[in-house]
Amino acid sequence: MTTEINNINEYKSYLDKVVFTSKGGFITETSKLVSLMLPLEDRIQAVEALTEAYFAHRGEMPTKIKMQDRRGRFVEALDLLADHLMYEFLEGDARPDKITLEERPVLTPNQIKRRVQDRGEISVDFNAALKSQASDGKNYRRPNRRVRSPYENHKVEEQALEKAKENNEAYRDAINPSKIRRLKVV
């Protein structure tokens, strides 16, 4: 029979019954703790209680224990618990304007990706750039086109559609046959 755990006292009493015989037990209990989503203060105490219980049973800290996160990637269990503690900062706070509201915001991977794409940041290979620079100050590298930013691509597509629309109307007017008019009735 399973009982629902809603606070830190219930979790600690549950944890007293758990015996860690292997690293797999720690992985199972870590997954259960992450799925509980206790309040932040209770989460901090629960993570401490879990690691201390593992240390009491096994005599070693749970370092180098790998497990799969919810995305299927293999991460260390302690890293997963740290991410669980910082849930509100990493995933729970998806406001797009948190950069302007906070002094040191924590961005999610998707927000970092979107920020880089919106800016149109281009990575530069400094080694190649320095090799092509001559002592006379000229740059002798082979010329190539710059990659457009997503904003520029969007603007170019809008202009192309507008031009095609105008050309299409002019073409339709040019090829349509005119109406036959009779000026004199015979």
Image: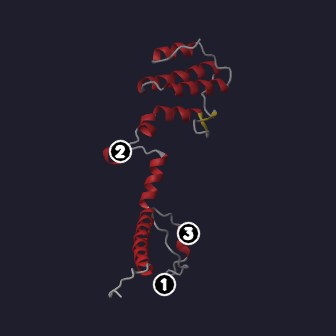
Q: Residue 67, percent across and down? A: 63, 34
Q: Is residue 114 above or below residue 66?
A: below
Q: Amino acid at mark 2?
A: Lys
For label 3, count other residues whose C-alpha is less than 10 Å away and answer few (under 14), some (14-19) or many (20+): few
**Relative depth, front residue between 182 and 2:** 182
Kindly check if marks 3 and 2 are in contact, taking CB atoms under 8 A apart as contact: no
Q: Tag 3, which secondary structure?
A: helix
Q: Tag 2, which secondary structure?
A: helix
- Closer to viewer: mark 2 or mark 1: 2
Q: Residue 10, percent across and down? A: 49, 14
Q: Amino acid at mark 1?
A: Asp
Image quarter in which the N terminus is found:
top right
Kindly check if marks 2 and 1 are in contact, taking CB atoms under 8 A apart as contact: no
Question: Real-space Cα distance between discs 1 and 3?
Answer: 18 Å
Q: Residue at x 53, y 27 (%)?
A: 35
Q: Amino acid at mark 3?
A: Asn
**Relative depth, front residue between 139 and 75:** 75
Q: Is residue 22 above or below residue 108?
A: above
**Relative depth, front residue between 1 and 48:** 1
Q: Is residue 116 above or below residue 30?
A: below
Q: Residue at x 57, y 19 (%)?
A: 53
- Closer to viewer: mark 3 or mark 2: 2
Q: Tag 1, which secondary structure?
A: loop
Q: Earlier in the sequence, mark 1 or mark 3?
A: 3
- Closer to viewer: mark 1 or mark 3: 3
Residue wearing tag 1 = 136
Q: Residue at x 64, y 20 (%)?
A: 20
Q: Residue 164, percent across and down? A: 44, 72
Q: Residue at x 52, y 21 (%)?
A: 49
Residue wearing tag 2 = 98
- Residue 127: mark in rendering: 3
